[in-house]
Image (cartoon, rainbow, N blue to C red):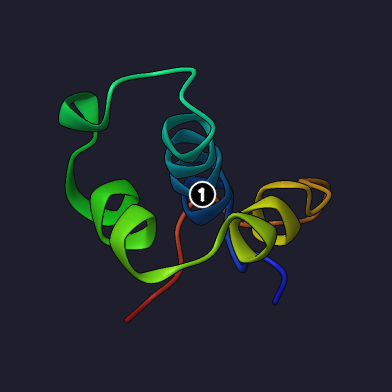
Amino acid sequence: MPAKSKAQQKAAGAALSAKRGETKVGDLQGASREMYDSMSEAELEEMASTPRKGKPEHTQG
């Protein structure tokens, strides 16, 4: 599932970094923490690798 906004992509990247052990899980907050808990590494990688061009910074809702 591709990211729908730049913010969602950044959160997925932070969660992916924690899944891989590159950053501390305790450093995650908000959406990135929820993504870490609920998504697999493959799902996070797919969302984080979405091209940013043309994406809004945030989505409504």
Report the residue at 49% width, 18% height from top.
22
Q: 54 and 9: which one is in front? A: 9
Q: Vertically, is 55 above or below 11?
A: below
Q: 18 and 61: which one is in front? A: 18
Residue 28 sits in quarter: top left
| Direction bottom: furthest residue | 61
Report the residue at 45% width, 57% height from top.
58
Where the C terminus falls, by quadrant? Answer: bottom left
Number of disc labels: 1
Q: Vertically, is 37 above or below 51?
A: below
Look at the numbered disc 1 and give the secondary structure of its residue: helix
Could you say where residue 53 lies in the image, as x and y percent from the top left? 83, 47
Could you say where residue 7 lies in the image, as x and y percent from the top left? 47, 47
Could you say where residue 15 lies in the image, as x and y percent from the top left? 43, 43
What residue is pinned by disc 1? Answer: 12
The crowd level at tag 1 (other Cα within 10 Å; few <14, some 14-19, many 20+) is many
Q: Is residue 12 left or right of 36 when viewed as pictured?
A: right
Could you say where residue 35 lies in the image, as x and y percent from the top left? 37, 60
Q: 20 and 59: which one is in front? A: 20
Report the residue at 45% width, 34% height from top.
14
Where the N terminus falls, by quadrant? Answer: bottom right
Q: Is residue 43 left or right of 60 when viewed as pictured?
A: right
Q: Is residue 46 left or right of 61 when viewed as pictured?
A: right
Circle 1: residue type: Ala
Q: 17 and 59: which one is in front? A: 17
Q: Is residue 32 left or right of 20 when viewed as pictured?
A: left
Report the residue at 54% width, 32% height from top.
20
| Direction front: furthest residue | 21
